[in-house]
Amino acid sequence: MTRYTRQDVLRILQLPARHLAAWEREGLIRPEGASDSEARYTFEHLSQIRALREMYSARISARSIRASIDAMQRVSGMRNPLTESTAVRRGSRINFRIGGALVDPVTRQLAFDFDLAGSGRQMTVVRRGGVAAAQDATRSNAQVQEMFLRAVQLEENPTTIPDAALLYEAILELRPEHAPACINLGTIRYNQRNFSGAETMYRRATESDPSYALAFFDLGNVLDEMQDLAGAIIAYRRAIEIVPGYADAHYNLALAYERVGERRRALRHWMAYVRLDPMGPWSLHARTQARKILSLDQLSIVSRGGRTVGA
């Protein structure tokens, strides 16, 4: 079985190291190995981490994720709900899709659900004999989900990434609005430095699911790479409008504002990042940038009580 190093995981999933460390502290990911340098991750770990990345983009707390996973293990007997079912965001909670059923493990409520696999948006089933049509829809969704999981697996091996891209394209032939397939195909193109191709797929994801904060964040990243800072700023701002607590979007937006000379606007987002992620080297950099801006512009931050405070 293939094993991945920590750096492999961070590179493959384009993940900040602090996120992986936080999920490991919560016990959501348990790599093999006794130390960070010896940590090794399996394909199952990568699938879990990918699911956690999606949840993070929706600002679902690690504690809430942990509670939902624990509850799902109790009610279903699953060893790992993140890989044995599909996690679906419902407000601030996580539900799990199994076949055509949607389960809230905390309340133990069960509902039929015909969402497009992984898209998070409800599909209207045309009535063609009621139950028979619903069964067809469930089978079709299961086929798409199986294709998606297979594509994810192919994506982790550098020699089979072209096969993964073809499979994502096949999924989009069946489900043109499948936003996660757009995102993953866009990321493949991004890593190939085909930035225009990546932009096309990320934009398609935002059009398929306008509430998909991660799609706007990734779009901002590729536009930034293409030196389209105005477009990147619009995309990052949209991600933050959807999820106001999206720390990474605040961080990247602050960088973009600084690069176009909008220091005062950058300050707001440096400060937001510090509030959302107060520990670690990225927070230190954000604090440093905020202090520089305050010093350059001779600004101050005044509390509601009128007391001047530092950055």
Image: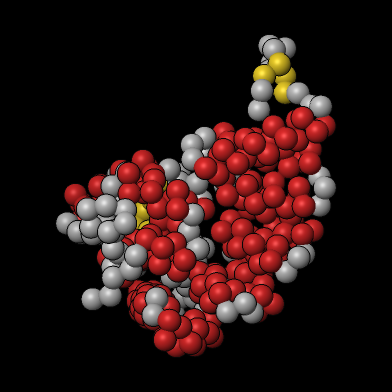
Please tell me in which quadrant of the rendered image residue 111 appears. bottom left
Q: Residue at x 23, y 57 (%)?
A: 33
Q: Is residue 84 above or below residue 284?
A: below
Left or right: 89, with 213 as reference point: left
State how many labels appear: 0
| Picture coordinates of residue 273, whole percent (x, y) | 59, 40
- Which residue corresponds to the image point at 76% horizontal and 47% vertical from the top-left? 258
- Give the answer, above or below, for where 269 lies relative to 220: above
Q: Position of residue 81 (x, y in %)?
A: 28, 59
Could you tell me which quadrant the C terminus lies in? top right
Q: Position of residue 49 (x, y in %)?
A: 38, 60
Q: Residue furthest front?
A: 37
**Residue 145 or residue 101, whichever sits in front:** 145
Q: Position of residue 109 (x, y in %)?
A: 31, 49
- Above or below for 39 versus 267: below
Is residue 178 among what the camera can see?
Answer: no
Residue 116 appears in the rendering: yes
